[in-house]
Amino acid sequence: MGEVLITIGRFFSALKNGDFLANKLNTVKAPQLQIGSILQGGLLTVSLPPIISVFGFKDSGKTTVATGIIKHLNSLNRCVLSAKHVGEPTFSIDSPGTDSYRHLEAGATATFLHSETSTTLLLSEPVKDLWALLELGVKAVPVDVIVVEGFRTWTQQNQQIAKIICIRTIEEISEFQAETASPILGQCTLNPEIQSVINIPDELPFLLEAIDKWLLTAPSIPIGEKK
């Protein structure tokens, strides 16, 4: 069973009753979510906010960098939407026999799992591409900046998206530079023997400074210019 997991933590964690949800949605003016259109890759009626893409090969420090960026932006009171690409083709957040799995198996297009701390949305089919997934997130919560991890195929050649490249070897520096469109905000490594790029975590503040400067003039991505 194909699925997409979207977890919206702090936004929904304060839900106590339907009135709060109604008031919150009225505040951000979030339109109705059209799940069927999302599954077909069709629901863009808004521009996407600035996007920062963190990519690299496995075990290159992507999550360390991405979470460092998210924490920094959060400290500046920026609302961050993040997305993480999972490379394992059989990965599933759900499993046969759970109540949510039974809902989808019975034919639900989507199902919510709600508790006092978070709300999770499971879709019955994979969203067609990154853009449709981000459109869903932007429609669900207020978003100032988007941070995506591991979506190299969708972001590497887009000149409106800021890239942060995580490397493991010196050879990867030139390899990624040749294949990646600007702007590249930095190249990072967990390998202390590589001195020509930003060493993580000690030199992370240099990368965060570059991000702050880029965001001063960073573009939103208009309708029809995502690819």
Image: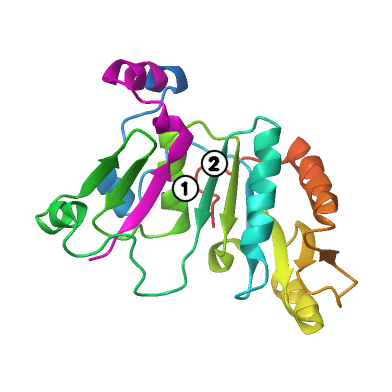
- Give the labeled residue for mark 1: 134
What is the three-letter code of the residue carrying label 1? Answer: Leu
Mark 2 vs 1, N-terminal side: 2
Q: Nearer the viewer, mark 2 or mark 1?
A: 1
Identify the element where label 2 is drawn: loop
Cβ atoms under marks 2 and 1 closer than 8 Å: yes
Q: Residue furthest left?
A: 106
Residue 20 among magenta residues? yes
Q: What residue type is labelled 2?
A: Leu
- Residue 2 makes an appearance in the image: yes
Q: How far across and down, in percent of the image, does residue 154 sit?
A: 54, 63
Please report the residue visible at 51 percent of the width from the left and 53 percent of the height from the top.
83
| Picture quadrant of residue 49 | top right
The range drawn in magenta is: 1-24
Question: From what the image shows, is residue 41 above or below residue 80?
Answer: below
Image position of 116 with respect to 38: above or below: above
Mark 2 vs mark 1, CA separation in Å: 8 Å
Q: Residue at x 31, y 37 (%)?
A: 115
Which residue is at the far right? Answer: 195
**Colouring of the image:** rainbow
Secondary structure under the numbered disc 1 in the rendered image = helix
Which of the 4 image quadrants contains residue 176? bottom right
Q: In this view, does 15 lie to the left or right of 102?
A: right
Vertical order, 126 against 71 (above or below)? below
Instruction: Give the numbered dot on residue 48.
Output: 2
Q: Toward the viewer: 119 or 106?
A: 119
Placement of the N terminus among the 4 image quadrants: bottom left
- Residue 66 spot, x, y in % from top left: 64, 55
